[in-house]
């Protein structure tokens, strides 16, 4: 057993989501969003490098020596499956291990709105799951893939960096390909996937113009494309895609979004009232005629009002979803206010009064 497994086993026993290892500090655990040290000595550069070299392949060791970050999956003998990033910083080597549960969670287990199942029924177009790093995008997409796998007979091709949840084929055939191992890039992976008779293509990250362009082509040519972006709202997602592509393609991109973008889900993870867990809260855009027109006429700033009016179609604004979860006592108001756009609406729920001057200094002074 690799020596690093001892830290990973301890982290899992504590119920953490991530294990952080860095030179000059003891190992740290991410517990319900907060980073906490374990009772252990500060790690030295030589010590930590020795731990990590035990689990790296020869190719990964060469990449690390050349100064590259490394992303890969690691399965310990007794510690479960992890997504790993190894990097170098000013004080030496570092690594983050993100725990990947063995069983793929269902949409019901994640308490996801019914709209997400509806999105799985589309036969073509693009559905995006967005949010900051660590907000559970990969878990939500894995649950959607599992729902497709359980209910439809499809050829599903996933492109990931690295592979996280492992999907056994059920009703569907699932082909999981890893960037850097099976394909050179997300864009090349999408290009290849379109020649492999896919029904659904999962793109782990729409990280550059070429990948976005290839994913758009796939969505326009009869495939359902699921993807992620590191954007923090439906409007920002649409603007990000338009801005990512060259100016001469602006009108073409807006045309694609108006016709082939089916939905945008933006999620955050908010602490539960007892502080022992976190719950996903979602902003949901479902494309309709009104939103399509706002996209083509450069009025994306008005989309938020459409989300407010579209509840019967499964739409919701982030602030509305947060307020509803607070009223249902599902999330901690003191944590929820960090994710709110119009924070004044949340002041009456806040129990930590120290938060209020930062929210509205003028009002607090008055």
Image (cartoon, rainbow, N blue to C red):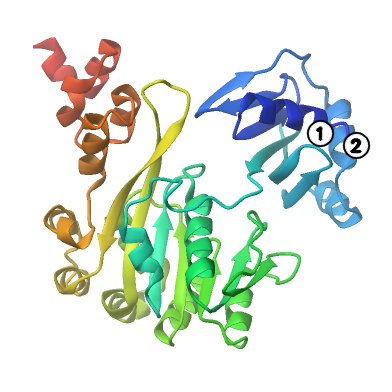
Name the residue at 30% across, 56% down: 234
Q: Please identify the quadrant where the N terminus is shown.
A: top right
Q: Where is residue 364 in the image (x, y as percent from the top left)?
A: 15, 13
Would residue 359 be found to the left or right of residue 275 on screen? left
- Identify the residue at the far left of this view: 366
Q: Position of residue 178 (x, y in %)?
A: 69, 64
Residue count near mark 1 (Cα–Cα under 10 Å), binned few <14, some 14–19, many ≥20? some
Q: Can residue 91 be seen in this view?
A: no
Pick the residue in front: 87 or 50: 50
156 is higher (above) or lower (below) than 359: below
Pick the residue in front: 96 or 111: 111
Total number of numbered discs in the rendering: 2
Name the residue at 43% across, 77% down: 216
Name the residue at 35% across, 56% down: 265
Q: In which quarter of the image is residue 260?
A: bottom left
Would residue 187 be found to the left or right of residue 93 on screen? left
Q: Mark 2 — residue?
A: 1
Q: Where is residue 177 in the image (x, y as percent from the top left)?
A: 68, 68
Name the residue at 18% across, 59% down: 303
Contact flag, marks 2 and 1 (Cβ < 8 Å): yes
Q: Mark 1 — residue?
A: 5
């Amino acid at each position: 057993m690799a020596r690093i497994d001892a830290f990973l086993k301890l982290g899992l026993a504590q119920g953490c989501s991530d294990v952080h290892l860095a030179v000059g500090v003891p190992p740290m655990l991410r517990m319900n969003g907060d980073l906490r040290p374990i009772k252990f000595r500060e790690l030295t550069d030589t010590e930590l490098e020795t731990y990590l070299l035990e689990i790296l392949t020869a190719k990964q060791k060469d990449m690390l020596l050349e100064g590259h970050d490394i992303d890969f999956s690691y399965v310990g003998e007794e510690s479960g499956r992890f997504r790993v990033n190894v990097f170098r910083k000013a004080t030496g080597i570092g690594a983050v291990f993100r725990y990947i549960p063995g069983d793929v969670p269902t949409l019901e287990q994640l308490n996801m709105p019914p709209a997400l199942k509806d999105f799985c029924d589309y036969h073509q177009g693009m559905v995006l799951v967005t949010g900051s790093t660590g907000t559970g995008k990969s878990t939500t997409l894995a649950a959607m893939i599992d729902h497709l796998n359980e209910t439809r007979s499809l050829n599903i091709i996933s492109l990931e960096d690295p592979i996280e949840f492992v999907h056994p084929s059920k009703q569907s055939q699932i082909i999981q390909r890893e960037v850097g191992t099976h394909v050179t890039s997300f864009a090349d992976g999408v290009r290849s996937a379109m020649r492999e008779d896919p029904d659904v293509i999962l793109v782990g990250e729409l990280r550059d113009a070429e990948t976005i362009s290839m994913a758009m082509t796939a969505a326009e040519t009869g495939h359902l494309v699921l993807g992620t972006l590191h954007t923090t709202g439906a409007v920002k997602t649409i603007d990000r895609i338009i801005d990512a592509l060259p100016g001469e393609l602006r009108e073409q991109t807006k045309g694609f979004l108006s016709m082939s973008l089916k939905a945008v889900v933006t999620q955050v993870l908010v602490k539960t009232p007892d502080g022992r867990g976190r719950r996903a809260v979602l902003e949901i855009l479902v494309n309709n005629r009104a939103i399509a027109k706002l996209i083509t006429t450069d009025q994306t700033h008005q989309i938020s009002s459409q989300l407010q009016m579209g509840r019967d179609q499964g739409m919701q604004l982030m602030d509305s979803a947060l307020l509803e979860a607070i009223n249902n006592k599902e999330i901690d108001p003191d944590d929820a206010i960090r994710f709110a756009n119009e924070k004044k609406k949340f002041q009456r729920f806040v129990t930590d009064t120290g938060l209020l001057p930062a929210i509205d200094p003028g009002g607090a002074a008055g």
